[in-house]
Amino acid sequence: MENYQQVYDTVTEMICDAKDLEMTDLAPEMPLHQLKLDSLDYVELMVLAKREFGATLTAEMFIDKPNMTLGELCQRLADAQK
């Protein structure tokens, strides 16, 4: 769980910076599409995942799972670190 929390904190910080949001505006059950991320935001997420967690995210993953939640994304990244 500690690993997930570190991932969640890092990802939400990046999203908050990109979208000028507060941490309290985000929740794990929030679908990514609700955050109104643009293509550049998704690219930044992919770069962050690779740099910080050694995980590869693809555009297809986001397209194939349009209702992916913030928590699901963070869990995927946490699992990829193991």
Image (tube, grey):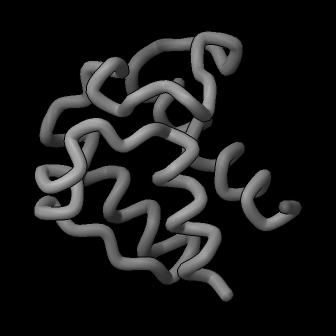
**Quarter in which the C terminus is drawn:** bottom right
For the point 66% across and 47% down, which residue is it? Answer: 8
The reply, left or right, for residue 18 in relation to residue 65 is right
The percent coordinates of residue 68 (x first, y second) are 36, 43
Q: Residue furthest bottom?
A: 82
Between residue 23 and residue 78, name the one nearer to us.
78
Task: Determine whether 43 is above or below 80 in the image.
Answer: above
With respect to residue 1, does 52 lie above or below? below
Residue 31 in the image, given as x and y percentages of width and height: 39, 29
Q: Is residue 82 positioned above or below 74 on the image? A: below
Where residue 55 appears, as percent x and y from the top left, is 45, 78
User: How many labels were placed on the picture?
Assistant: 0
Residue nearest the observer in this picture, 37 or 70:
70
Q: Residue, x 18% and y 41% (percent of image)?
A: 40
Q: Is residue 63 above or below residue 3?
A: above
Residue occupying the point 78% across, 52% down: 5
Residue under the point 27% across and 27% down: 33
16 sits left or right of 58 in the view: right
Q: Quadrant of residue 80?
A: bottom right
- Which image quadrant: the N terminus? bottom right
47 or 68, which lies in front?
68
